Image (spheres, rainbow, N blue to C red):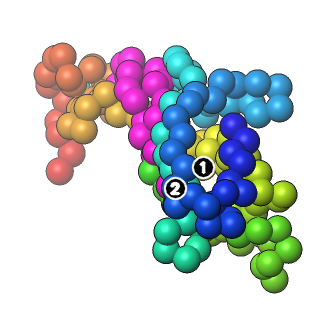
Amino acid sequence: MALNITSLVNGRLNRIDFEYIIESSEDNAIIPPKDVSFTAPIKVKGYVDGSQGFIELTVNASIDYRGSCARCLGDVFGTFVLDFNRTVVPFGTLQNELNDDYVIVKGGVLDIDRLIVEELLLEFPSRLLCKEECAGFCSSCGANLNVEQCDCPKLK
Ligand SMILES: [Zn+2]
Ligand SMILES: [Zn+2]
């Protein structure tokens, strides 16, 4: 979504709230990690706040996923939630435009979809577990230790 924040920049508004969804598109593809599928679009909520003398973007994003457990290969379903903030600065005011702590706004329009998708894919867990205490497979006989015991000697 492209947010026009001109009224924040010139002080006429203190805060702009937003809530929308981001669907995967040609321009902004949401490509899940290997062995994961995203089962719904990204839900996004947040606001841009200018009341502190600078402009800050706050984002809360979530996405539903399906994947497989890194230990037992069982199905894992869940919702991954991501919260982050960025300071918004007008184009041309920074020495180094590549600093990731900032979002550059051009012509008063803040386009945050790509930022959110990148951040989400960066932070998405590289290993999913069906449950924290998943016992996985026995490394000797391959039994699924979540559902059965085996007689293999246990390594200490
Ligand atoms: Zn598991
Ligand atoms: Zn075993």
Name the residue type under label 1.
Glu
Q: Which residue lies under the disc numbered 2?
A: 15
Q: Is residue 97 left or right of residue 50?
A: right
Q: Which residues are magenta?
A: 56-82
Dividing the image into four quarters, tell me where ligand 2 lies: top left
- Name the kind of residue labelled 2 in the image: Arg
Which circle marks residue 74 in the picture? none
Can you say whether 103 is above or below 27 in the image?
Answer: below
**Residue drawn at point x = 26 percent, y = 32 percent:** 131
| Whether residue 111 can be seen here | yes
Where is the N terminus found, in terms of image quarters?
Answer: top right
Q: Is residue 23 above or below residue 14?
A: above
Residue farthest along the bottom direction in this orientation: 95
Residue drawn where x is 54% and y is 40% of the image = 18
Q: Main secondary structure of the magenta part?
A: strand
The answer to if 78 sits in the magenta stretch is yes
Q: Residue at x 84, y 57 (%)?
A: 107
Disc 1 designates what residue?
A: 119
Q: Position of residue 154 (x, y in %)?
A: 17, 39
Asked whether residue 96 appears in the rendered view, the answer is no
**Secondary element at tag 1:** helix
Query: x and y percent of residue 120 in the render?
Result: 56, 43
